[in-house]
Image (cartoon, grey):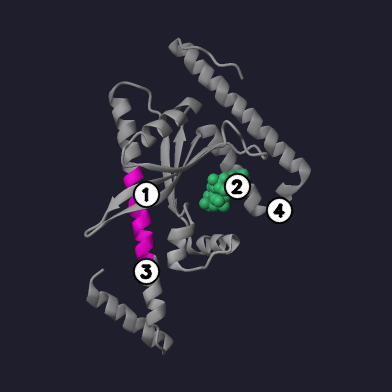
Amino acid sequence: MDKNKLVNQAELIQDFFGEDTEPFFDKVTQFNQLMMKYNSAIREVKTKLEILNDELSFKGEENPIESIQSRIKKPMSIAKKLRKLGKPITVESVEENLSDVAGIRVICPFIEDIYQVAEMLIAQDDIVVIEIKDYITAPKPNGYRSYHMIIEVPVFFSKYKQPMRVEVQIRTVAMDFWASLEHQLKYKNENTKTTQIAQELKECADVIANTDLRMQNLRHKINDKPVEKP
Ligand code: 0O2
């Protein structure tokens, strides 16, 4: 941002609060700069995924990616998570302790597409894998399924390059449907913790997982590939 604009904003805030707001203003600027960096990292990873999808589509293969969503964690969620981890709520602490400020969700048509997308991304030599959690092979007890990766991608700024962490969640359309609704229900109502509702949610997740597998097998039958047992 241009320096005069920053000084003007600082003066405005100072007038508004009627006291020395420099420390506050510094922190806000530092925080916004960090969020700008996470946004840039999201753009880098999103572009990589879009290129992979375009290339496969060009080769005449079926698109492994249905859609890509992204989000930057909100300041309040960042603060809550740092508090939960018992870490200081400072800008430095965000970079040091959180890996999911920048998040990308990749929605794939079929289960096998998830692993193909993950492999293609990991194979790129500027990507460093920090952590993988495969909640498809080992679903969460509540039925949640998704493939999670924490990766580091280098982002080139005007005077330096910085590796930035991004959380990538990859899941099928069906897994996403379940996770979105379960998230909504959990957010709206604490009752989802009651055994009966939790049990029903888990059953729905299992039905969906079975449907995912059947759809994949149908794809194999149509394309003359080996069929997997549920
Ligand atoms: P948001 O708003 O999506 O960012 P941690 O992230 O370290 O607190 P954990 O369990 O070690 O927690 O990380 P994990 O398992 O990789 O899960 C992180 C994210 O996965 C969550 O982010 C959710 O987006 C998603 N997720 C994990 N479990 C569930 C689940 O049971 N149901 C649904 N709907 N989503 C889930 P956040 O930070 O919780 O939320």
Q: Which residues are magenta?
A: 32-45
Residue matched to label 1? 42
Q: Residue 55: in sight, yes or no?
A: yes
* Labels 1 and 2: the sequence-earlier one: 1
Q: Is residue 26 above or below residue 172?
A: below
* 78, 105: nearer the viewer: 78
Q: Residue 65: in sight, yes or no?
A: no
The percent position of residue 217, horizontal first and vertical second, equals 53, 17
For image coordinates 69% across by 53% down, the residue present is 189
Q: Is residue 187 above or below residue 135?
A: below
Residue matched to label 2? 183
* Marks 3 and 4 in Cβ contact (< 8 Å): no
* Labels 3 and 4: the sequence-earlier one: 3
For image coordinates 77% across by 41% down, the residue present is 196
**Residue count near mark 3 (Cα–Cα under 10 Å), binned few <14, some 14–19, many ≥20:** some
Say left or right for 198 vs 34: right
Amino acid, disc 1? Ile
For image coordinates 55% across by 33% down, the residue present is 174
Amino acid, disc 3? Gln
**Residue count near mark 1 (Cα–Cα under 10 Å), binned few <14, some 14–19, many ≥20:** many
* Marks 2 and 4 in Cβ contact (< 8 Å): no
Circle number at residue 30: 3
